[in-house]
Amino acid sequence: MNKKYFFLFGIITLIIVGGYFVWAGRTMIVVNPIQDQEVQIDKIIGTSTQRRASPISTKKSTVQKAAAISKNMYVVTYTKDGFEPSEIQIPRGTTIKFVNKTGTSMRIFASASSTPPFSDLNQPKTLGLNGEYEFNFVYSGIWEYYNSLKPEDIGKVVVY
């Protein structure tokens, strides 16, 4: 009787361990926004290779470099041409500082402004020239936003 349970326990353990190695062996592709390169990470071996990023279709046609203030903070600038970069990819827990470099006002609103957690991105007040708004992205997802005072100016933050 104990041999049956031991055998069953062994099979379940093999399935769990085998499933983990299959899951852990998947390859991840992450775009490094500072170097504009894709980093391919092999979880089992722990090595990585780099190659140029392929363009992602957006208003400005590519994921652009963002100025990094520190490891966990980037700057997105609002200019007369819109948000620069218009799309950025960041890990969870990263803060983006939105800086208005125009003579017009800026007020960030999430495209899904009524749906939490995306509605948390909504800027509480309008900012003028050199005004700054910081937001910490703690949830993964695609955060699309726009300037509520000039809705054609849009941007996207992809949080992984």
Image (cartoon, rainbow, N blue to C red):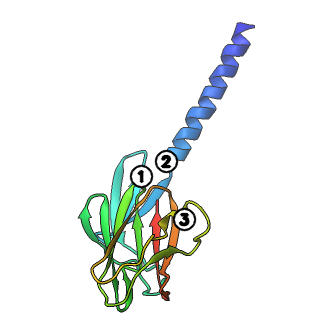
In the image, residue 136 sits, relative to residue 123, either above or below, namely: above
Question: According to the image, label 2 marks what residue?
Answer: 25
Q: Indicate which disc, 1 or 3, sits on the residue closer to the N terminus.
A: 1
The amino acid beneath tag 3 is Phe
**Which of the two labelled residues, at mark 2 and mark 3, occupies the earlier sequence position?**
2
The residue that mark 1 highlights is 42
Residue 118 — which label? Answer: 3
Query: Which numbered disc covers residue 27?
Result: none
Crowd rating for badge 2 (residues with CA inside 10 Å; few <14, some 14–19, many 20+): some
Find out whether the residues at labels 1 and 2 contact each other: C-beta distance under 8 Å. Answer: yes
At horizontal 50% and vertical 75% (from top left) the residue drawn is: 109
Disc 1 residue crowd, few under 14, some 14–19, many 20+, Cα 10 Å: some
Q: How many marks on residues?
A: 3
* Of the two numbered discs 2 and 3 in the rendering, the one whose residue sits closer to the viewer: 3
Dot 2: element? loop
Would you say residue 37 is visible in this rendering? Answer: no
**Residue type, label 2:** Gly
